Amino acid sequence: MIVLSAVLVALLFTPFIFFRDGKEKNRKKALLALLTEMAAADGGHLSVHELWNNAGIGMDAQNAFLVFARGEEAQRQTARIRLNQVKSCRVDVVSRTVERKSDAVKIIEVVALELQMKQARETSKRLVFYDSEVDGFAVSNELRLAELWQTRIREVLGSAPERVARTAVA
């Protein structure tokens, strides 16, 4: 009876698992297709890319440009950035410290790459890797990814790594 119950439960949940995985694969394929299309619009191809949550970033190192997309299709944020127009790149971490009775807890609210442009009239570009309001309360690999991409961009720019953390006390 127990074996039969386990088999029935497995049969009932299997389609849901495959549907979820299939939906995730389709979402990632669509995001990669978008990044590839954005790169092709500038006459290049992605030499390296990364996909996570509902975002993706890619770079054509040979032609020195970066593509970025984040969010659902209806309200997606995209950016195409020529790296020869970028002055500097840094990881920006916005966090707050919550005081508790016995200790303090640091909560990361935003992880982003901040690209400072060479032209003073151009505003800096902010590529958000993690936002607690959208992505939930747990940072997974976004900080590591932002630091990795900072390194990749700086290799193209020819500069050393830098990380800036802003903390607010709540």
Image: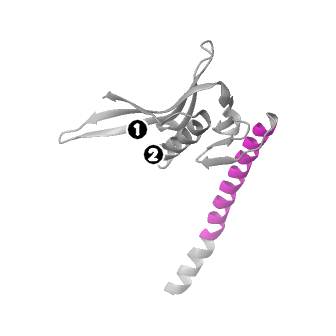
> Which residue lies at the image location 59% right of the left edge and 18% below the top edge?
123
Residue count near mark 2 (Cα–Cα under 10 Å), binned few <14, some 14–19, many ≥20 = some
The amino acid pointed to by label 2 is Val
Please identify the quadrant where the C terminus is shown.
Answer: top left
Residue 107, image x, y percentages: 36, 38
Exactly how many numbered labels are in the figure? 2
As drawn, 85 above or below 4? above
Front position in the image: 88 or 35: 88
In the image as oriented, which residue stretches furthest toward the left?
102
The residue at which mark 2 appears reads as 139
As drawn, 52 above or below 7? above
Taking the image as shown, residue 63 lies to the left or right of residue 11, namely right
The amino acid pointed to by label 1 is Ile
Prevailing secondary structure of the magenta residues: helix
> Which residue lies at the image location 66% right of the left edge and 67% below the top edge?
15
- Discs 1, 2 touching: Cβ within 8 Å: yes
Residue 38 is one of the magenta-drawn residues: yes
| Badge number at residue 108 | 1
Tell me the magenta residue range.
13-40
Element type at marker 2?
Answer: loop
Front position in the image: 115 or 108: 115
